DNA sequence: GCCAACGTTGGC
DNA sequence: GCCAACGTTGGC
């Protein structure tokens, strides 16, 4: 159980059908349940699916109408104690986990939650990214091996990710299981990706909308097919 | 429903 | 360690 950060945030919207650029937050339409009493914005977000949000704030969106098949997940490779809990979970830690598999618990951001719950499916490949460290970047590849299911840490009052507002018959937070596939042939740093991203902004290249830069705080991000292949090819080139 | 205050992420 | 960016909270 990787101690993920308590909340990794970012805004993204996963749009199902059409994607209009901009949606700021995904807006779950309240499925059937209309809210009685006042509901916080966050709670509103809690519901279910999303559609293009009303207030478009203008932001480019990488949200394609497609459903995603690749992802990027962030984790901290260095020891850091938060609320007396170790936040470290590196690619090596995944490697030494039983069956090289771990649940991805502790994510407390609605957009990330929606991806975990609704879109990440077994067999899909995922970049493993090291954040909050000296050299942030992509270190390896893992794979979703279990689709979204309730994150048990939300119900454990002793866990730092405990959420007293979540009920067992209507869990708020979800996680998937991921299994190590392989390390990258070479480390691909954030700096390198950033350079390419900036070039691609001008040239219209494949990394122009990379989530690491367009949604820098989202800890579970979709990666398009084009982004995935492009980054994989970087493996075979010199840094 | 707005928005100021606050908290967190995560690069640098 | 700093702090910009941005999500969340809660008063009104």
Image (cartoon, coloured by chain):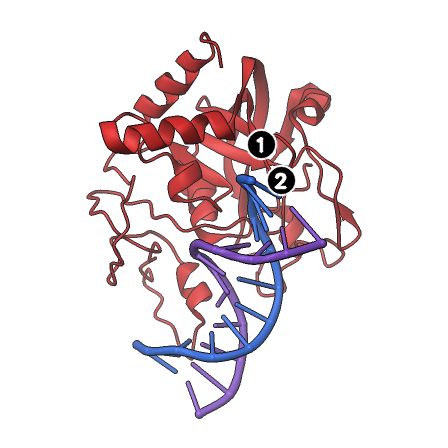
Chain colours: A red, B blue, C purple
On the rendered structure, is A102 left or right of A185?
right
Q: Residue, x 33% and y 51% (percent of image)?
A: A49
Q: Disc 1 marks which residue?
A: A136
Is residue A55 shown to the viewer in this render?
yes
Residue furthest toward the top? A236
State yes or no: discs 2 and 1 in contact (Cβ < 8 Å). yes
Q: Residues within 10 Å of mark 2 (few under 14, many from 20)?
A: few
- Of residue A20 and residue A46, the one placed in the foreground of this image is A20
Q: CA distance from mark 2 to mark 1?
A: 7 Å
Q: Quadrant of residue A44?
A: bottom left
Q: Quadrant of residue A32?
A: bottom left
- Of residue B9 and residue A133, the one placed in the foreground of this image is A133
Q: Residue, x 59% and y 36% (percent of image)?
A: A131
Q: Quadrant of residue A124?
A: top left
**Residue A195 rendering spot, x and y as whole percentages:** 41, 28
Is residue A204 shown to the viewer in this render?
no
**Residue A163 rendering spot, x and y as whole percentages:** 62, 60
């Amino acid at each position: 159980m990787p101690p993920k950060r308590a909340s990794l945030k970012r805004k993204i919207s996963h749009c199902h059908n059409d994607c209009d650029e901009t949606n700021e937050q995904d807006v779950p339409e309240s499925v059937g349940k209309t809210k009685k009493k006042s509901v916080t914005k966050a709670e509103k977000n809690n519901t279910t699916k999303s559609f293009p949000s009303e207030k478009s704030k203008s932001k480019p969106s990488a949200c394609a109408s497609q459903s995603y098949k690749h992802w990027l997940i962030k984790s901290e490779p260095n020891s850091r104690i938060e609320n007396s809990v170790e936040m470290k979970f590196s690619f090596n830690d995944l490697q030494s986990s039983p069956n090289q598999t771990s649940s991805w618990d502790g994510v407390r951001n609605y957009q990330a939650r929606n991806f975990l719950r609704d879109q990440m499916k077994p067999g899909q490949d995922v970049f493993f990214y090291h954040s909050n460290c000296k050299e942030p970047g992509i270190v390896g590849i893992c794979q979703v091996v279990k689709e979204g299911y309730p994150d048990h840490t939300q119900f454990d009052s002793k866990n730092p990710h405990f959420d007293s507002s979540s009920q067992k018959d209507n869990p708020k937070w979800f996680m998937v299981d991921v299994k190590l596939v392989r390390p990258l042939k070479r480390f691909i740093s954030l700096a390198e990706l950033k350079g390419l991203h900036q070039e691609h902004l001008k040239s219209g290249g494949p990394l122009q909308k990379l989530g690491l830069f367009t949604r820098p705080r989202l800890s579970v991000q979709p990666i398009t097919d084009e982004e995935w292949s492009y980054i994989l090819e970087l493996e075979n080139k010199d840094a």
